[in-house]
Image (spheres, rainbow, N blue to C red):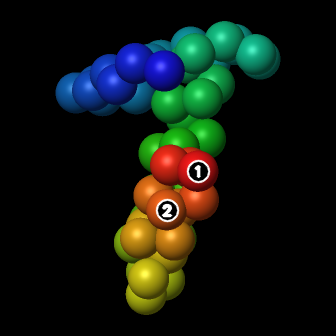
């Protein structure tokens, strides 16, 4: 998996495309930041 950083979300989102992944991640990011300990849990879980 490669890490990519975007300055803005794509204007067109295609199902199953990388643009959809960026859109989903951006949408869920605020919820992840609001939940205490969630990013640490996610990092530990993905690292396994």
CB-based contact (under 8 Å), mark 1 and mark 2: yes
Q: Any mark on residue 33, and which?
A: none
Residue 22 is situated, as x and y percent measured from the top left of the image, at 51, 30
Left or right for 18, reference 17: left
Judge the density around disc 1: few (<14), some (14-19), many (≥20) Cα neighbours within 10 Å. few
Judge the density around disc 2: few (<14), some (14-19), many (≥20) Cα neighbours within 10 Å. few
The residue closer to the viewer here, 39 or 14, is 39
The residue closer to the viewer here, 41 or 26, is 41
The answer to whether 40 is drawn above or below residue 8 in the figure is below
Q: In the image, what residue occupies the spot 40% across and 27% down?
A: 9
Residue ID for mark 2: 44
The answer to whether 33 is drawn above or below residue 13 in the figure is below
Residue 27 visible (yes or no): no
Q: Any mark on residue 48, and which?
A: 1
> Tag 2, which secondary structure?
helix
Q: In which quarter of the image is residue 20?
A: top right
Left or right for 6, reference 31: left
Q: In the image, what residue occupies the spot 76% across and 16% down?
A: 16
Residue 8 is situated, as x and y percent measured from the top left of the image, at 30, 28
């Amino acid at each position: 998996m490669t890490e990519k950083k975007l300055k803005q979300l794509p204007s067109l989102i295609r199902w199953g495309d990388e643009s959809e992944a960026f859109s989903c991640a951006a949408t869920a990011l605020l919820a992840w930041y609001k939940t205490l300990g969630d990013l640490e849990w996610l990092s530990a879980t993905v690292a396994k």
